[in-house]
């Protein structure tokens, strides 16, 4: 599994993969954080395509073209806002990863990059989010040879990357 999953610190808008995942809002309108960075890098065409989609409920995912990004596609998923952990946040966050992988598989995409969904302004504790991200991704990945075959957790900070590496190590040991 280590050959299929990796953790990097970097700018997700620079990843050369088939699709990057956007931590979007339910309206799919350009927001802040990762969402704003992806929209800026992709150009105004991304916002126009998102408007036509008409939104995305929390836990679900939608796909658009990547426009000016190195990635051919953007998979938009809406993570949960943290309310203390008793309002189904873990299930919704896991669904973000599962549904994104299902979309990548349906479109025959071999590689994809995830940000740390919900850990910014949505306030999800980074260590818990990383554990959910890694477990949900591992559970959702198809058999080797099927798509996607390579998943990168692209973290904005070394601290976030450390949480993802620890989660990956804990599951693989």
Image (cartoon, rainbow, N blue to C red):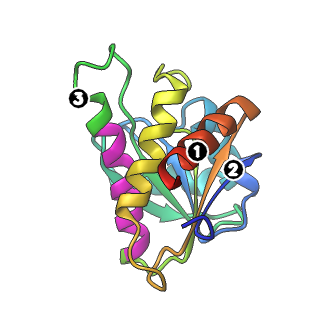
Badge 2 density bin: few <14, some 14–19, many ≥20, Cα 10 Å: many
Image spot of residue 134 (x, y percent): 48, 49
* Residue under the point 27% across and 41% down: 57
Tell me if residue 29 can be seen.
Answer: no
26, 110: nearer the viewer: 110
Residue 84, x across and y down, in percent: 33, 13
Question: To which residue does mark 3 refer?
Answer: 88
Q: Which residues are magenta?
A: 92-105
Q: Which residue is mark 2?
A: 12
| One can see residue 73 in this view | yes
Residues marked 2 and 1 touching at CB (< 8 Å): yes
Quarter occupied by the N terminus: bottom right
Task: State whether residue 18 is above or below residue 40.
Answer: below
Q: Which residue is mark 1?
A: 115
Q: Residue at x 35, y 30 (%)?
A: 80
**Residue 98 location, quadrant:** bottom left
In this view, the mark in front (3 or 2)? 3
| Distance (Cα) linking label 3 and label 2 | 27 Å
**Secondary structure character of the magenta stretch overall:** helix
Q: CA distance from mark 2 to mark 1?
A: 7 Å
């Amino acid at each position: 599994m280590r050959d299929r999953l990796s953790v990097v610190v970097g700018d997700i808008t620079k990843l050369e993969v088939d699709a990057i995942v956007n931590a979007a809002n339910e309206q799919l309108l350009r927001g802040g954080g990762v969402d704003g960075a992806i929209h800026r890098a992709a150009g105004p065409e991304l916002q126009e395509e998102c408007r036509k989609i008409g939104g995305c409920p929390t836990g679900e995912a939608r796909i658009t073209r990547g426009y000016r990004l190195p990635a051919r596609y953007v998979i938009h998923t809406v993570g949960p806002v943290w309310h203390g952990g008793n309002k189904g946040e873990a299930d919704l966050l896991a669904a973000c990863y599962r549904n994104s992988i299902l979309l990548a598989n349906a479109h025959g995409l071999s590689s994809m990059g995830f940000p740390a969904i919900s850990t910014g302004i949505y306030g999800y504790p980074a260590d818990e989010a990383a554990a959910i991200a890694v477990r949900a991704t591992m559970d959702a990945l198809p058999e080797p040879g099927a798509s996607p075959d390579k998943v990168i957790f692209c973290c904005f900070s070394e601290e976030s990357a450390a949480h993802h590496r620890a989660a990956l190590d804990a599951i693989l040991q």
